[in-house]
Amino acid sequence: MVQIKTPEQIAKMREAGLVVAAIHAATREAAVPGATTRDLDMVARKVIADAGAKSNFLGYGGFPATICTSVNEVVVHGIPDDKTVLKDGDVISIDAGAIVDGWHGDAAYTAFVGTGHAPELIELSRVTEESMWAGIAAMKLGNRLVDISKAIEGYIRRQPRPATGKYGIIEDYGGHGIGSEMHMDPHLLNYVSRKRGKGIKLVPGVCLAIEPMVSLGTAQTEVLADDWTVITTDGTWSSHWEHSIALTEEGPIVLTSPDCGKARLAPYGVTPAPDPLG
């Protein structure tokens, strides 16, 4: 069952989304050489506490932290700790979430630590982020779930190949519904699969977390012994971007973007619905 939200519920999700946006801003500033990933987790905890919100990551399935900190070849679900010290040239993807009055927000971004990053890493992040926006732009009334998958994969496949030979669109993880829980139906692939068909029809009240994950090599992953940390099987570095989006009668609202997605959707000819918080 796909949960359909009312305008009032979407407004609550927007509140949660703005807390997530604040976590992103604070952790991006703190992701500097010498910081540990636990330092970033403590920054996120303070943002959530100051907002009077709750963490939807801490304790989820036993997860021991407030954010996921995935460094270099770690694709997703990296656990913050005192041992992982960020250094110049690292790439980190930070996935964060928050709950306000029972309603969830969830979003991720990739950041560059220090300087000296190879051009292919900068391009990897750009391609992954822009594929997310292409997917968000395809979240239109009357479209199907597969149209989002097609937009994400299509954008990535149209880009020049990196020096490593190809972009790997991670197959084991994807986007999802979001609302009164963090992970809900439907599951959203970041590529087109004939086995999955066209998927649900996109109607007002559908809320999705759209989150492509792309590597500089393989699409395959493995989970480490901690049962959380996911790495690429060939050790290539990766990027992860995500936003939570609500579809309304007036169009999409990027709930976890400060401007509801206005600036990044403009090139696609898409105007977000008005901010439900005014």
Image (cartoon, rainbow, N blue to C red):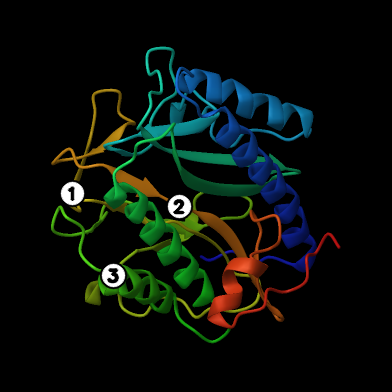
**Tag 3 residue:** 159
Answer whether labels 2 and 1 touch (C-beta < 8 Å): no
Q: Secondary structure at mark 3?
A: loop
Q: Could you say which is closer to the camera, residue 105 or residue 93?
A: 93
Going 58% across and 67% down the picture, which residue do you hit? 264
Q: Which label sits on residue 220?
A: 1
x and y percentages locating residue 254 in the rendered image: 63, 63
Q: Is residue 215 above or below residue 186?
A: above
- For the residue marked with disc 3, what is the amino acid? Gln
- For the residue marked with disc 1, what is the amino acid? Gln
Observer able to see residue 181: no
**Tag 2 residue:** 241
Q: Residues within 10 Å of mark 2 (few under 14, many from 20)?
A: many
Counting residues from the start of the chain, the first of labels 3 and 1 encountered is 3
- For the residue marked with disc 2, what is the amino acid? Trp
Going 68% across and 33% down the picture, which residue do you hit? 54
Quadrant showing the C terminus: bottom right
Q: Secondary structure at mark 2?
A: loop
